[in-house]
Image (cartoon, rainbow, N blue to C red):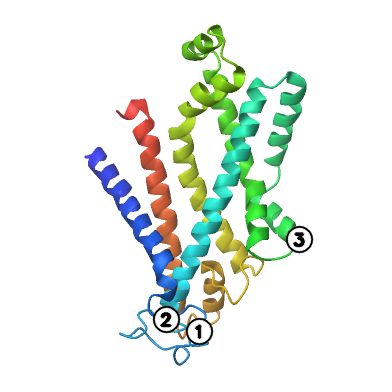
Amino acid sequence: MRKRKFDFLFWGGVTYLVLLALFAMFGPTFRHHYLEQVGQPLQPSSATFWLGTDEIGRDVFARIAYGARLSLLIGLTVQAIALFIGVFVGVTGVYAPRWVAMPLMRFTDGMFAFPDILLAILIIGVWKAGIIPVIVALSITGWPGTARLVFTQVASLKDREFVVASKALGASTFYTVTRHVVPQLYGVLMAVTMISLAGTILAESTLSFLGIGVQAPDPSWGSMINNARLQMNSYPSLLFWPCVVLSMTIFALNFVGDGIRAALDPKGR
């Protein structure tokens, strides 16, 4: 029974994410352009405007779709950067000379002392608001967790038989790491990345909600929620739809990440 429930959540999450990707690709201009005023302000849902219009008369459906595009773009970019830095730092912390590895890992540990969202706010405050600063700020706060995970995993693999055999056959450290050690981490990194992606999207929405993330006129789920908050009593649908899409995205990413983790857990087989 537990396995069937897990499968349902995992495949439900996968299905939702596929539909979200299609929504993000085609939704912003499917019926109306996300930046154009196409109707009267604050119109309810109808055959013309599926989710109604906002306070300026723009199509809410198109703007939520573009918000999905931005969230996925920022989230995937941040995760790619965090993975690259995290894998490099984690592997270096195991295989580099002690005088390099120790300061590097102590610096990584020190990064955990700063609350992620507050450090991101500080970075954006020093720089400026916008998409690129958000990506940079979230990348800086995102890599330490990956680095610590990779360090732990690589340290446990360093003395395994297949690694020792590779060295005994004369393989270089670079070859052994890239061909034998890092491939062992693909599954774990995939599971962690899915869950971290949920946190990144939520952080981006939080920054946009605070007004220091994605800037107008480009819509973000966070900025849409913030704008709708002012009219939530009279027009609750403006607040409802971005909140629902954001929540379902976070749930789906966590379900998929947890499903991958469970599939890789030998105790669950």
Residue 234 image point, x, y percent: 46, 86
In the rendered view, tell whether residue 89 sits above or below residue 223: above
Mark 3: few/some/many CA within 10 Å (<14, 14-19, 20+): few
CA distance for labels 2 and 3: 34 Å
Task: Report the residue at 39% width, 53% height from top.
Answer: 252
If the image is split into quadrants, where does the N terminus sit? top left
Mark 1: few/some/many CA within 10 Å (<14, 14-19, 20+): few
Q: Which mark is residue 103?
A: none
Relative placement, left or right, of 187 versus 106 is: left
Residue 230 image point, x, y percent: 55, 80
Secondary structure found at label 1: loop
The answer to whether residue 145 is seen in the rendering is no
If the image is split into quadrants, where does the C terminus sit? top left
Q: Which residue is mark 2?
A: 32
Mark 2 vs 1: CB contact within 8 A? yes
Relative placement, left or right, of 28 versus 118 is: left
Residue 61 image point, x, y percent: 41, 76
Q: Residue furthest top?
A: 168
The answer to whether residue 256 is seen in the rendering is yes
Q: Which mark is residue 127?
A: 3
Q: Amino acid at mark 3?
A: Trp
Task: Report the residue at 42% width, 81% height from top.
Answer: 32
